């Protein structure tokens, strides 16, 4: 069954993941791959699997995603956004079909994502379980240099089913290299917000009806706290019950805390480089 939904997959050197990703959206007859300079077989593989490939040099996450939604000619008014290391579950596919039959006034839908680590699904130790992925391109824009925050012009719904995520599909070394780059972008984002005098609300961070608004204000306030890596460990391991994920949960939380420390160090490095 073909659904009236286009699919957008962002790639860079994803020949290991792409085929498995696209297999889970076989219901789609309008798959687009936005590639940012792959040096492996990603682009030929995507074309061989029936996807339309567009090339664009990567600058930052929000600009990249916004450009895609503004410039790619999608066949359908709704677009499901995927990363190559993600897989749609059958239940999620059915939920997408159900939502498209009667979307009502919704302009976007959130999806629950589940990370896998050391061969195990992480049921608790996750930073952001819900992400906006099914969108009307003209009703959404993303902000922030990395870990984009969606700004939806209209109501947001929620889909059933899971989006399985395999961030360690290429090994821990690849994860570390990628998150080292992410940390540099997070540091630039933090300084940009400081220089702009952007203000964040505790009330919105805790009580906003929209997950995207809560996330944005939570992150802004979190950047102002001391001992962030230690606090992130406490939140993920104890408050989010990461200890219930046993050994993989502990290892994942430690890696996330290390990532937070890289952001702290890179922010200090940038501040020092700019002088008094």
Image (cartoon, rainbow, N blue to C red):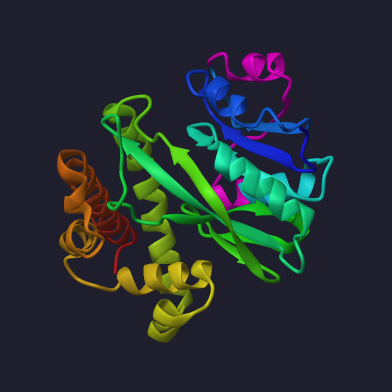
- Of 38 and 128, nearer the camera is 128
Q: Is residue 73 left or right of residue 167?
A: right
Residue 238 x, y percent position in the rendering: 17, 61
Residue 88 x, y percent position in the rendering: 55, 37
Q: Is residue 4 left or right of residue 200?
A: right
Picture layout, residue 148 above or below residue 17: below
Residue numbers of the magenta segment? 40-64
The answer, for residue 200, to whether it is visible in the render is no
The answer, for residue 177, to whether it is visible in the render is yes
Picture layout, residue 188 above or below residue 276: above
Quadrant, the N terminus: top right
Residue at the farthest bottom position: 203
Residue 255 x, y percent position in the rendering: 22, 44
- Of 226 and 233, nearer the camera is 233
Q: Is residue 59 part of the magenta span, yes or no?
A: yes
Which image quadrant for residue 132?
Answer: bottom right
| Residue at left offset 16%, top offset 66% | 227
| Residue at left offset 69%, top offset 54% | 135
């Amino acid at each position: 069954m073909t659904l009236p939904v286009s699919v957008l997959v962002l790639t860079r050197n994803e020949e290991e993941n792409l085929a498995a990703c696209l297999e889970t959206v076989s219901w789609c007859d309008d798959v687009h791959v936005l590639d940012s300079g792959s040096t492996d077989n990603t682009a030929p593989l995507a074309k061989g699997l029936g996807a339309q490939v567009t090339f664009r040099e990567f600058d930052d996450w929000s600009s990249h995603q916004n450009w895609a939604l503004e410039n790619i000619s999608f066949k359908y008014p709704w677009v499901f956004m995927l990363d190559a290391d993600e897989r749609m579950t059958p239940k999620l596919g059915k939920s997408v079909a159900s939502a498209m039959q009667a979307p009502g006034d919704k302009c976007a839908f959130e999806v629950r994502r589940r990370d896998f680590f050391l061969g195990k699904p992480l049921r608790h130790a996750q930073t952001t379980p819900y992400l906006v992925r099914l969108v009307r391109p003209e009703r959404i824009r993303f902000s922030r240099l990395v870990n984009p925050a969606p700004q939806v012009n209209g109501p947001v719904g929620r889909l059933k089913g899971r989006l399985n995520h395999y961030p360690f599909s290429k090994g821990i070394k690849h994860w570390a290299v990628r998150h080292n780059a992410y940390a540099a972008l997070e540091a630039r984002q933090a300084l940009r917000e400081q220089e702009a005098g952007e203000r964040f609300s505790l009330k919105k961070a805790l009580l906003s009806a929209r997950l995207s608004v809560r996330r944005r204000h939570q992150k802004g306030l979190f950047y102002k706290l001391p001992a962030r890596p230690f606090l992130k460990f406490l939140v993920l391991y104890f408050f989010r019950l990461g200890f219930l994920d046993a050994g993989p949960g502990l290892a994942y939380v430690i890696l996330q805390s290390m990532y937070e420390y890289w952001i702290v160090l890179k922010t200090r490095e940038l501040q020092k480089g700019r002088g008094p």
